[in-house]
Amino acid sequence: MKRRPQILACSGVLYPPEGFRHPGVQIWQAMQLSGVRKPRMCLIATAVGDSREHIDSWYVRGSSFGDADLTHLQLFTQPNVPDVRSHLLSQDVIFVAGGSVVNLLAVWRAHGLDAILRECWEAGVVLAGQSAGSLCWHLGGVTDSFGDDLDPIDDGLGFLPFSNGVHDDLGDQPRRSRFRRLIGEGVLPAGYATEDGVALHYVGTRLHEVLSVLPGRNAWFVEADGEGKHRETAIPARCWLP
């Protein structure tokens, strides 16, 4: 039976609150969405340049949530598996690390991963990731890949027909206002933003549910109001923890 295409687009928890006991819990959420008792899960850490520290952390955090077959795909300085397409298509979950979404997209396209990942998604492999690993599946969003000015990107993979804003917390998070301004001005299309710890669960190209690892958090649907500004709608998240 063919599995449904699913994406879990997450804002990681940049500043965990005191007493937070669930680092890496969005890995667990993606694991659960696969519906497999012992899922095969592959990390792609291109956005952090295949950082050894990040890859090592994947094996520690992933193994803490139960019985899973964990692997990783690295592209620097060359792929670490003999057949990238076969390896990724054999997975139940592909989890993409945060970091530079601009570098991620460039390297993926050079290696043909854009087409391979679409094939995985259409085959029912759960695609998931945090920050850059959330932005990449959408049409575009806001990035600090070029610097702290928070530039728009409009060349995401486009599996999902929306823009995406991550780390969209109230207060002094500049990404929040920048994302809304760019949508109001028509630079970015309408889309979904997520506060820290919140994830967008898509089935096909439709938003199915908003999930969180912290209580009282929201996602936001942001669209242009036709007068150069934006309007937004809060979507409360369901807190889902092991």
Image: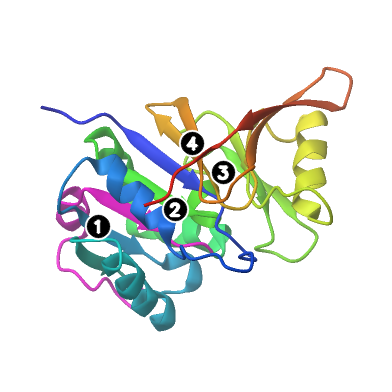
Which amino acid type is shown beneath numbered disc 3? Asp
Earlier in the chain: of badge 1 and badge 3, it is 1
Per the model, the C-alpha gap separating discs 4 and 3 is: 8 Å
Q: Which residue is mark 3?
A: 155
Mark 2 and mark 4: Cα distance apart in space:
15 Å
Mark 2 or 4: in front is: 2
Estimate the x, y position of residue 228 in percent, counting from the top left.
88, 25
29 lies above or below 159: below
Three-letter amino acid code at the position of disc 4: Gly
Circle nearer the N terminus (1, 4): 1
> Could you tell me the amino acid type at mark 2?
Gly
- Please, what secondary structure does the residue beneath circle 4 have? loop
Identify the residue position indicated by label 2 in the image.
Answer: 129
Residue at 10% over, 27% down = 1
Residue mark closest to the camera, 1 vs 3: 1
Task: State the CA–CA distance, disc 3 to disc 2.
Answer: 18 Å
- Residue 140 in the magenta stretch? The answer is no
Residue under label 1, please give it. Answer: 41
- Label 1 Cα crowd, 10 Å radius (few <14 / some 14-19 / many 20+): many
- Residue at which label 4 appears: 158
Q: Give the prevailing secondary structure in the magenta stretch.
A: loop
Residue 13 percent location from the top left of the image: 58, 60
Q: Nearer the viewer, mark 4 or mark 3?
A: 4
